[in-house]
Amino acid sequence: MVDGFEVVTKFDERTYERYEFQFYIDGELYKGDFYEGEINWLNPNPKQTISESELQSLEHEIFGLLQQHNIRGTMGTAEMEARDDI
């Protein structure tokens, strides 16, 4: 589903440090922040173009891609995988 996933650290070594990621779906660029174990979507928000079930699948994939970059936020790997809402 996701193509060209990239992630960078924003506000490095500050209390509000977070990760910004971007990727493409069908040629459309999407961006978001990952902070304290949560994904915060920037515009355009995928909620505007895909169904709720597709969004859950997408967020699950994003969590997996973040883990591949050794990014786990405040949640451990098992906690992210066990969440019902992703």
Image (cartoon, helix red, strand yellow):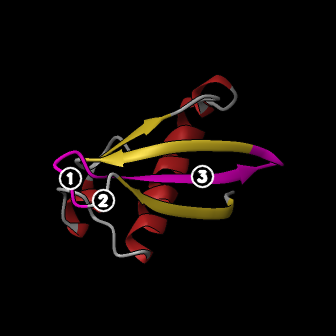
Q: Which residue is mark 2?
A: 12
Q: Residue 1: image x %, image y %?
A: 69, 57
Q: Are marks 3 and 2 in contact (CB under 8 Å)?
A: no
Q: Residues within 10 Å of mark 3 (few under 14, many from 20)?
A: some
Q: Residue at x 58, y 63 (%)?
A: 6
Q: For this rendering, which residue is in front, 64 or 71? A: 71
Q: Residue at x 62, y 63 (%)?
A: 5
Q: Which residue is mark 3?
A: 22
Asked whether, in this view, residue 29 is left or right of residue 55, the answer is right
Q: Residue at x 55, y 49 (%)?
A: 58
Q: Which residues are magenta?
A: 13-28
Residue type of the residue flagged with mark 3: Gln
Q: Picture quarter containing residue 52?
A: top right
Q: Is residue 18 magenta?
A: yes
Q: Are marks 1 and 2 in contact (CB under 8 Å)?
A: yes
Residue at the limit of the structure toward the top, as seen here: 48
Q: Which residue is mark 1?
A: 14
Q: Residue at x 58, y 27 (%)?
A: 47
Q: Residue 42: image x %, image y %?
A: 53, 32
Residue type of the residue flagged with mark 2: Asp
Q: Choose the circle earlier in sequence order: 3 or 2.
A: 2
Residue type of the residue flagged with mark 1: Arg
Asked whether, in this view, residue 47 is left or right of residue 81, the answer is right
Q: Secondary structure at mark 2?
A: loop
